Amino acid sequence: MSPTRVPLNTVVLLTAFAILLGHQPAWSFSIIEPKESSVHQSGNHIPVALDLRGLPGVTRVNYYWYEEFDDMLRVSVEEKLALVATDKSTPPFGGNIVVPEEAMGTYRLLAVAEQGGRQSQHESLAIFDEILIQIEPSAELLEIDFQTDKPLRLGRAGGARVYDQVDFLGKTLELPVIGIFSDGMTRSIRAQSTGTTYQSANDNIISVNPNGVLRLVGNGETVLTVKNRNQEATLDILVEVNDEPNHPPVSNPGTTQTVSSGTRVTLNGLASYDPDGGSLQYHWEQVRGSKVPLLDPYSAQSKLLAPFVVEERIFRFTLRVTDILGADSLPAFVDVIITP
């Protein structure tokens, strides 16, 4: 006998009714394989399995690969889709998934359920789980390279504006760093989780954070040294920008919020500030959880409706602010914990 299917609207009503009564249904939706923080090789097939204990009406589960800090509001969901599993899959709603061959470092594996033929990623229902895993290529790293001009000339030194606008102190840019491997693959190794380290010969000209974000601090010449595994590369950098003093702004997205499903949530960045007293521009991103509609992501206060969840889930957002001269803050994180 085939299992009874419960319509999606029934599931939503049951969830809402249980919340009103103060009871939580004994449902579960958890990735049980692979394990959190496990290490896997690029290009390998690995098994995925779920615990769907007591959860009614699931018709299929979509699995997605995201880099650790991918902005879910910007990237295409279709491009990240790695596997579609149904109750006919082995195991049910699981199977074998391919680790991206070009991947290296920390990645998010996100599993999202659909019920009654409709995706649960809408404003009223979100059934998902995600884990962070480490991906390592088995191939040898042969060379580190920078996908930019060499030497890197910024501001007037380049004869033109580079990376849109960099004619001022405090501007940041993400340095494109790649590794060339013995398996013929070229992989991004900019993130700290890939094992890359950075050192600027003069932090008063260029400073660099652990994830390869450069900040223009002053005018002059410096050398950036990048290391990964047994390889090392250097990049000469020449900065010639307007020398008007300008302190970078500071991003403050607030503190962790714990809210119930169905609550209207405000992400509040009003505590962010510019040490020079100027006005700010705001940019919110989502980097954890299933994708949720975010209202006014370019305002100081962005809003969302907490979706209904079957288990406590974390939604993580980042805020970056920019001052009137174009200096950027580093991104700051805030979590919204949503309970059934």
Image (tube, rainbow, N blue to C red):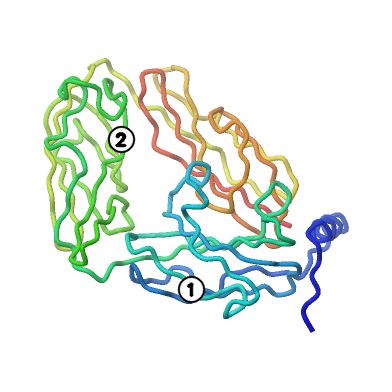
**Amino acid identity at mark 1:** Pro
Q: Position of residue 137 (x, y in %)?
A: 28, 67
Q: Eyeballing the image, is 272 above or below 38?
A: above
Q: Is residue 200 left or right of residue 208?
A: left
Residue appearing at x 68%, y 62% in the figure:
311
Q: Residue at x 16, y 20 (%)?
A: 159
Of the image marks 1 and 2, the number of the one nearer the N terminus: 1
Q: Quadrant of the N terminus?
A: bottom right
Give how far apart the Cα atoms at labels 1 and 2 are.
34 Å
**Quadrant of the frame with the C terminus:** bottom right
Dot 1 crowding, Cα within 10 Å, few <14, some 14–19, many 20+: some
The picture quadrant where one finds residue 302 is top right
Look at 66% across and 49% down and name the residue there.
Answer: 258
Q: Amino acid at mark 2?
A: Leu
Q: Secondary structure at mark 1?
A: loop
In this rendering, the answer to whether 166 lies above or below 263 is above
For mark 2, what is the residue? 173
- Residue 312 drawn at (x, y percent): 66, 59
Residue 34: assigned label: 1
The spot of residue 280 in percent (x, y) is: 47, 22
Instruction: Identify the secondary structure beneath mark 2.
Output: strand
For the residues labelled 1 and 2, say whether their Cβ atoms are less than 8 Å apart.
Answer: no
Q: Nearer the viewer, residue 335 or 295?
A: 295
Using the image as rendered, state which of residue 98 and residue 209 is in the foreground.
98
Q: Position of residue 146 (x, y in %)?
A: 19, 45
Res 5 → quadrant: bottom right
- The one of 271 and 237 positioned closer to us in this rendering: 237
